[in-house]
Image: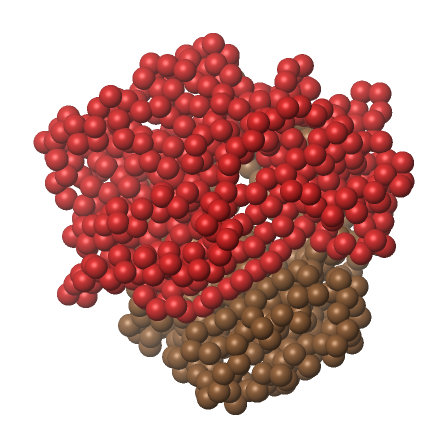
Amino acid sequence: MNNEKVELIRKAIQSKNVEEYEIYLISQQIYETQFLKNQIESEREINDLEYIIRILSQRNIETGIGIVKGNSIDPKEIEKYINTCLLLAKNNSTSKYNFPEKKSISQISTVDQKLIKDPLRAKKEICEELITEINEYKDVTPTFGRFRIHIQKRFLNNSNGIDLDNLRTFFYLEFSLKTQEKGKLSEYWESEYIKEREHLNFNKRVEKWARISKDNLKAKPPKSKKQALVIFSPSLLKDAINPVVGFQALGKAFHEKVSKFNLNEKVASDNFTIIDNGLLEGGLLTNAWDGEGNAQQKNEIIENGIFKKRLFDQKYAILGDTISTGNGIRTENGSITNGNTNLQILPGDISLEEMISNVKEGYYIEKCSWLEPDEFSGSFGAEIRNGYFIKNGRFSNPIKGGNVSGNVLEMIKNCQFISKETEFSSNSLFPYIAFPNLTISF
Amino acid sequence: MIFGLIMSNKSNEEIFVIFEEISNSFKRENQYFDILFDSVSSVRIKKSLTEESISINAKKSGIVARTFIGSWKEFATQDVSELKNIEKKLPKVINKGEEINEFEAWKINKEIKPKINPSDIPIEEKIQKIRDFFNYLRKYDERIINPIIFYSESLMTRIFFNNEGCQLRQVLPRIRFFIQPVVKEGSTIDFDYFSTGGEKGFEIIEEILDNKLEQIAKNSLEMLKADTPPSGKFPIILDPDMAGLIAHESFGHGLEADQILRDRSYLKDKLNKKVASEICVICDSPNLKNELGSYFFDDEGIPAGKNILVEGGILKRFLHNRHTASLLNGIPKGNGRRESFAHPVYVRMTNTYFEPGDYDLDEMISEIKYGVMPTRGYFGMEDPLGGGMQCTSKKGYLIENGERTKLLKSITLSGPVLELLQNIDAISNDNLNLHGGTCGKGVEDFIPVTTGGSFIRVKNALISPG
């Protein structure tokens, strides 16, 4: 792909003899259907474009970085943006930074051609498939839903010769299924970004929504217990692991003196291996290059319980005198932050069914209202939305309400069981894991 | 019709002419139609131990047009050359005009002028101010390992036309400021935070003096000695932040009338029934002055009004947009909001709060033998169907024998929200205190809001470490 808008901006920057610059342009089409119950409530089509200019001003031991975001392609406006960016670069003062050099980066397909060819038709077909599947379940009713197709084109061009582009498609799916009986109400409400069409898997997905919604109608508050054994679903595990383990592994956390992980030290149980995998097949954030143009990689963070590798973007790599691991994430305001790509926990050797059968008394939690652990300490406390009490190796009754509390950094030191099965949830591919030593309160 | 490449370069008059022409091409008797121009420029500065970032959003703009033909059809674009496609993208029909109620047309063209316009302050001065805050905190105590400072100013212009004759323009300045000194002693890392904001100018930054910074530093350092809170059911006193979180997250989301249409609210059958203790008055109002959730009109052209949601413990009304008001015979007060032109309009809250009561805070504390006081509301999540509650505070205090004693770490409050509201037995007479934040509809569509109230005592509530 080439982009005439990038070229227009590049020429405008070069005409001002700017030595170090970067242009990141993203254009996207979004096609959305919203549902009220099982009827279409709204259909939306959005065309959006924005670009970010970054300009560097080098000084002895520091660099000034100017960042301007805009969407005008009027030459006069572009000139104003460049002047503003130069002013910001002159006034900013950050640690030494330079843009990545041009390297050979292999291509990865991140696009579903059927969606590109006729997105409106694809959306209609997928929505019909979803509603047909939902209508199969007579004892649950949909309350609302949203389905979106995103088509994103991204371009990255810098003064070191980087000239990259990428076409990417993905979905957003949100739905709530409700069950009602004798004045009692319950629901299962899911919202998820999904990369691949095959991962939509409505047959399995809707069956799960309906089952949990119906079970939840009979849910009881959980019995209070300290030292409780709790199995986390892959999506709940994502909410626990990503903000804590993902954060603690970053070069940023190390340089800000808040990481509790020391290289080659044991930080988790032997059966725990987690990878930041920017090349993961089907991963939401899979791409050949990161937000700065460095190659995304497969980086083992914790291998068999040992902390093996920190994750760096360009800035923290320079600070640590090392090289980027492809973990420069473009933020909404155009700056780069050191972050995670896709996180993957390697599966164990026991099935979920076997795992449950090994539990004399414990809890399975599918979903909490908002786990949101503290990234520094790993502590959390959250209300249980959907779960089950496990008694003598099987689900005894559904649970809802009450709180689960614990500490993610302590939990990973004691992963009692890790399942064979893994599931995608946004940018994670995780198994089910059973942790002892959590607190359930009601 | 003249089409340029960007909308933000056009004068208001040019935009008005274009919008009027497009709106009039859709006959109101056949279908409802509206069009919104959205432009935002912003400055953000972030400073931390390893980062200084300054970014400017140079007036990003776009338009969104929609019509109701039994369901909504909507087209949004940042490229004004696509304006001509609106009539292709949005179908014209006949006889669908009555499906959306008609509201009185009106005109307004208003700009809020802050005391100190941020655009009058040179960027160098803003950066220096942030660096001064950073340096003060860094030097204050070596245990402050990373003072994180975040400054954001924005100027939002919205122009709204519809085929009922509304011709509206508003310009709203918003500013937000946040300080989080991260502290470390041994292996313990923690923080407290300070935030402020509103439809105000740079004066709110000028008002932060050394004594304020010292207090922020001390608050964070104190967290190093904080105890883990107990788990279980206790009498609690919520500070205004936490009270507001409950009014908004746990209670308010169930009052958004799109949830009523969806049959997805635990409050659907509670209109005119008792839902809270009789001392409770809960409101949502976008027409408070200079708050983050305030404006003159919403993104459907409805003038900002005041919703008295609960009065004397009785549920009085739901929150409406044009669609829900049409279907449920409600009166919209300006609760139809979009994050931007690229996001959908939903029924949303604005400034949501408990009205102050007539108790003295010291008296409220003195009557508790053993309880907890969660303070500094941190985050919460809605459960519109189930009426469940999760609100987490950044810290809190133990109350023992009528006195506030030990400082506690983060506390999570949960349980059925109606049970909590019914259990309120005292509301303090302190002034209304609102706190700014952002609110998502589920996990998306973030808009500025405030929440608050005064201090609220609950006879019995479930808490655990957060």
Q: Is residue B122 above or below residue B229?
A: below
The part of the image, by quadrant, that contains residue A379 is: top left
Could you tell me which residue is drawn at 54 percent across and 19 percent down? A310
Vertical relation: A78 (above or below) A44: above
On screen, residue B254 versus residue B165, left or right, reads left
At which x and y percent is residue A424?
37, 37
Instruction: Check the rendered structure and report the hue given to chain B.
Output: brown
- Asked if residue A153 shows in the view, the reply is yes
Which x, y percent locates residue A327?
57, 28
A223 horizontally vs B262: left or right: left
Chain A: give its colour. red
Residue plotted at (65% across, 57% down): B198
Q: Position of residue B44 (x, y in %)?
A: 70, 45
The residue that appears at 53% across and 62% down in the rendered structure is A45
Viewer-proximal residue among B14 and B5? B5
Location of the N terminus of chain B by quadrant is bottom right
